[in-house]
Amino acid sequence: MENIQTVSDTNQAEIQEIFKSQQQRQYETGRSTAAERIAKLKRFHQAISDYTPEIRQALYDDFRKHPSETDLTEIYCITGEIKHAVRHLKRWMKPNRVATPIALLGSGSYIHYEPKGVVLIIAPWNFPLNLTFGPLVSAISAGNCVMVKPSELTPHTSRIMKKIIDSLFDPDEIALIEGGVETSQALLALPFNHIFFTGAPAIGKIVMEAASKHLASVTLELGGKSPTIVDETASVKTAARRIAWGKFINNGQTCIAPDYLFVHKKIKDTFTEQLHKNLEELYSAEPEKSESYCRMVNNRHFNRVKSYVDEAVSDGAKIISGGVYENDQNYISPSLLTDVKPDSALMQEEIFGPVLPINFYEDLQEPLQIIRSKEIPLALYIYSNSRKNIKQIIRNTRAGGTVINHSVVHFFQNNLPFGGSNNSGIGKSHGFFGFHAFSNARGIMKQILPLSGIDLMMPPYTDMKKKLIDLTVKWF
Ligand code: NAD
């Protein structure tokens, strides 16, 4: 594959023209039946299968991602989301009848999910295919016209995604717009009906501000620091393996990666030993030679993470594993640190790289207090076999999602809402929740009988009507 370094911005006139044509097309697309949308999704699925070798190559060229990791964490997420939507879309689109209160007897009501209209999806680079096409599946299922902007930092994947979209859809229905911040801002200036943004909290604020100009609704899938607690009852070997996998997959560049650990002091030595062992099993004793271990996306992110570690070490932190760098390859070996100060960047900023600070605790109240002092995380992981501890942790913290005795895997569960809360996000995605995010739940009520209870309560307020209103307020 040709080595592409950058993505060029799309010019504003072209963006505006596509937006206008989508506005004109939106009702035609919105009227599509479940069968028509399913046919679109199936064509999308087929194209992803056809282009799989090129997708694998693109992800390898962007950050040396192993083809099997691409299959599991990029392709499977999309094909899984498509299959789920194909299976359930007819039911999601059906009018959803609701009960009638006594005061409204004689009427019937239902919820009709209509498309938002013309929507914008802005995606990040860390799972470039998954996080661009995943929301697109939901937007198509809900019957929208869509403009999608992938990240400029993964140009090979952006190129192949554009090829796929151009081969499948008319731009007046679905258009992939390549470009960086300038393109993103040109798009954000347009009066979209909904904006679905995945990225950093700081940029999420810019997106929300832009959306407020047109009162566009938003879904913000943001990031943050996802804590992991391993208590004294946890199955140490399993916990170590699953944490090592969840943390170092995609080189730690995962929004829901375990960001920092709290391990009970009783299992301190066995746990750290197991974590070492599992890192070696996953990526060998020489991870720089392992084909399964990918790289930081670029030198800026490499230097950012390295500077966090340097700062922590100069402040007394100990590297108990890893700490090896290769600047020209954006390579950081899987690194474990202890004795990291609470006010260090490693414990304050989202790490988004292959470095894991480990804290030890004696009383569960200690991690709970620290977690609650920070922004609400996107995920919180609990490794424990104590129902009491699990309940205590869940009831005394908040998080976008939680997995008990595993890491990261809730992303694959399309029956659960996926997303954060406040700093880690607004709104939910995946499965029905993704369809819902791109739909307006329109409440429709129909008066069926000639007379409604409310008709009897209209002015003038005679004694009889006053009594009737009184009864209604008291009893119905
Ligand atoms: P980012 O916010 O820098 O970029 C995301 C998108 O926003 C890109 O398409 C980029 O072109 C655009 N953008 C960047 N600056 C902009 C600006 N000033 N104005 C308008 N648009 C702008 O994020 P990233 O570095 O690509 O991704 C990493 C972040 O995303 C992390 O914080 C991570 O936790 C988060 N993330 C969240 C999820 C989730 O599902 N919640 C998933 C993946 C990543």
Image (cartoon, helix red, strand yellow):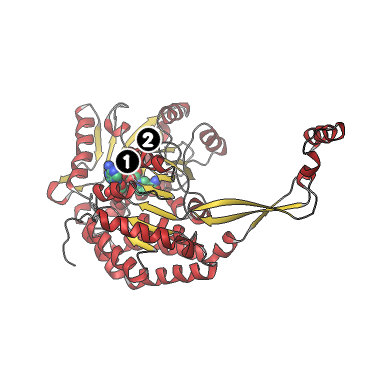
Q: Position of residue 132 (x, y in %)?
A: 36, 56
* The one of 131 and 367 positioned closer to us in this rendering: 131
* The one of 51 and 470 positioned closer to us in this rendering: 470
Q: For the N terminus, give its image quadrant.
A: bottom left
Give the foreground label among 1 and 2: 1
Q: Is residue 139 toward the left or the right of residue 109 in the image? A: left
- The answer to whether one can see residue 171 in this image is yes
Q: Spatial distance from mark 1 to mark 2, Cα to Cα?
A: 38 Å
Q: Is residue 433 toward the left or the right of residue 190 in the image? A: right
- Residue at the location (30% across, 26% down)? 343
Q: Is residue 182 toward the left or the right of residue 102 in the image? A: left
- The answer to whether one can see residue 275 in this image is no
Q: Secondary structure at mark 1?
A: helix
- Residue at the location (25% across, 65% down)? 57
Q: Position of residue 242 (x, y in %)?
A: 40, 49
- Whether the residues at callouts 1 and 2 have beta carbons within 8 Å, the answer is no
Please, is residue 345 above or below residue 109 in the view? above
Q: Quick one: which residue is furthest to the front in this view?
A: 460
Q: For residue 119, which quarter of the picture? A: bottom left
Q: Is mark 2 within 8 Å of ligand 1?
A: no
The numbered disc on residue 268 is 2
Mark 2, Cα crowd under 10 Å, few <14 / some 14-19 / many 20+, is some
The numbered disc on residue 109 is none
- Residue at the location (18% across, 41% down)? 303
Which residue type carries mark 2? Answer: Lys
Q: Earlier in the sequence, mark 1 or mark 2?
A: 1
Q: For the C terminus, give its image quadrant.
A: top right
Which residue in the protein does label 1 denote?
203
Q: Secondary structure at mark 2?
A: helix
Please, is residue 371 above or below residue 1 in the view? above
